[in-house]
Image: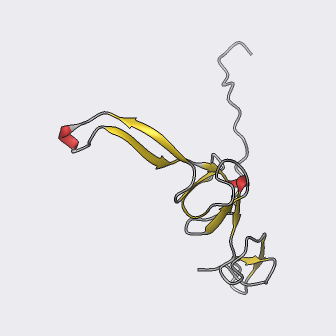
Amino acid sequence: MYGRTSKEKQDPIHKPHVRKGDTVVVRSGKDAGKKGRVLRVLATKGTAIVERVNFTKKHTRANPQKNIKGGILERESPIHVAKLQVVCPSCNEPARLGSHRSEEGEAVRYCRKCKADLTK
């Protein structure tokens, strides 16, 4: 009661519907309509880094010891996974995903439009 308590509450981690290597389309925001490949998924934050989407400018200082030139760099920033929709490779359209268990017992994602598996 009188001791220190942490005020940070841990949100439950939700499993994102996108995975590394998926082709996605951005549904809302300044980059709406852009397609790109997922480079990295940050599940604890619920974000993903998508290739050529959501660029921000980062100012860097020159460091000759590490061969880094100074200036303004443009790089991708994380974007929330709720703004992304997976593009089905077989029907080539943005589609919602479903999942079912295979005979081996592992979860398999499939396109809910054309019923094609999205396994790699």
Q: Residue at x 64, y 52 (%)?
A: 31
Residue 109 sits in quarter: bottom right
Q: Is residue 89 above or below residue 42?
A: below
| Residue 95 percent location from the top left of the image | 76, 71
Number of numbered callouts drawn = 0
Extreme residue in the right direction: 113
Q: Residue at x 68, y 71 (%)?
A: 87
Query: Considering depth in this image, is 119 or 39 the residue closer to the camera?
Result: 39
Of all residues, the one furthest to the bottom in this rendering is 103
The foreground one among 13 and 4 is: 13
Name which residue lies at 19% across and 39% down: 64
15 relative to 87, above or below: above
Q: Is residue 100 left or right of residue 54?
A: right
Vertical position of residue 58 compared to residue 100: above or below = above
Q: Residue at x 76, y 79 (%)?
A: 101
Q: Quadrant of residue 10?
A: top right
